[in-house]
Image (cartoon, grey):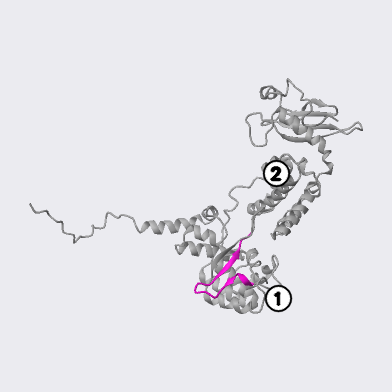
Amino acid sequence: MGWGVMAHRVRSMKLQTRGARLRLPVAKKPVFVKIAPGLSLGYRRNQTTGTWVVRVADGNGANWTKAIGAADDFEETVGSLDFWQAQDRARAVARAGQPSGAETVAKALDRYEDDLQTRGSDVANVERVRIHLSDKLAQKNVALLTTSDLRAWRDGLARELAAATVNRTASALRAALNLAADQNERIVSRKSWEVGLATIPDAERARNVILPETQVRAIIAAAYKESEQVGLMVELAAVTGARVSQLRRVEVQDVQGDRADPRLMMPSSAKGYGKKVMRRPVPIPEALAARLRLTSAGKPGNAALMVKPSGEPWRRSDHSRLFKRAVRRAAGDPSEVTVYALRHSNIVRQILANVPIRIVAVNHDTSVAMLERTYSRHIADHSDGLARESLLDTTVPEASTSVVPIHRSG
């Protein structure tokens, strides 16, 4: 059929201009214009920006339709299409064929999991989504997802999970859908998940547990009573403030203990699609460096530094039960004190020790903006203390001066 991009373009008084389209009534049913045999371009008038739709005859008396992009009704935005561009897009989609063969949400997650494994990232992000995904949504075509589909799913999660957890879960699904769109030209719009899976604001303002140093030391000591390996994992988490996901990837060669200022080359968390895993030096005490050298003696450089008592590398959540036991030994409440409390406590300790915020951010593989948002109260207290030293107190007499003015002689 004549569906090529260079085929004759059709004019339409109703759809050709913005003004004409905006005079149409808001309706769910699109207005179609035939642009080739068996091929029509439709426009759905919405309350806001309208949507272009293609309708293609299947040759058996039926047809299929698909939304192909947003119209440039109000302004030219990234991805919006005018009438002529929409015709070209409709012809390209028709040439590609019926979208029933395109990948489903479930297939997009499978592809995303493969990509994470290739990049050495945490595949648990995919499992987090699968646990909460209904069969109906899992089998839905990515190209046919709507904003309401995904917003209803996100809001359903919010009724069961903390807002921060909802954001992390939605972000993983959004990454999978973005990867699908990157690799499949039939998926021409990302608006449904950009809007439907929008981040819930202020989700990170949950109370972070900050432990006094005495309690941190008690938890470390209790962890060593579980085993040497558990103790090392907990001590390293407390001293560096690193996430367990980072500690699991530390290798023997990352320990730089034979120097006056021992340090550990800490791998980044690799959070986010396309982020390259990097290693940055994090200072550690000499005593801890010595223990790490001892435990890694005789191992190849690329071997995992942190291992379980069985000698196997730590896997995700392997530490949870053992850490809870250590917290109980230290007279703490495991429902309040998680391993993340060690990270929070270390960040606050550095802030209050006058370590510049930028260095604190680098040491903990995060951003200054995230620190300011999450630890604003502690940063404010720290800033207040520094500024208070320079306050002018007018009730205190001016200090006497021993400077004697010099008079010029005539």
- Left or right: residue 60 compared with residue 320: right
Mark 2 lies on a secondary structure that is helix
Where 109 sits versus 328, above or below?
above
Residue type marked 1: Gly
Q: Quadrant of residue 367?
A: bottom right
Tag 1 secondary structure: loop
What label sits on residue 311 in the rendered view? 1
Q: For residue 193, which numbered disc appears in the image?
A: 2
Residue 171 visible somewhere in the drawing: yes
Whether residue 100 sits left or right of residue 194 in the image: it is: right
Residue 29 shows in this picture: no
Q: Pick the quarter of the image with the N terminus.
A: top right
Q: Whole-percent x and y of residue 172?
A: 69, 52
Q: Earlier in the sequence, mark 2 or mark 1?
A: 2
| Image point (82%, 27%), residue name | 36
Q: 217 above or below 360? A: below
Q: Please identify, in this view, whether the residue under mark 2 or under mark 1 is nearer the observer.
A: 1
Camera-nearest residue between 406 and 142: 406
Query: Which residues fall within the magenta stretch?
Result: 252-269
Q: Residue furthest top?
A: 13
Residue type beneath disc 2: Trp
407 displayed left or right of 292: left
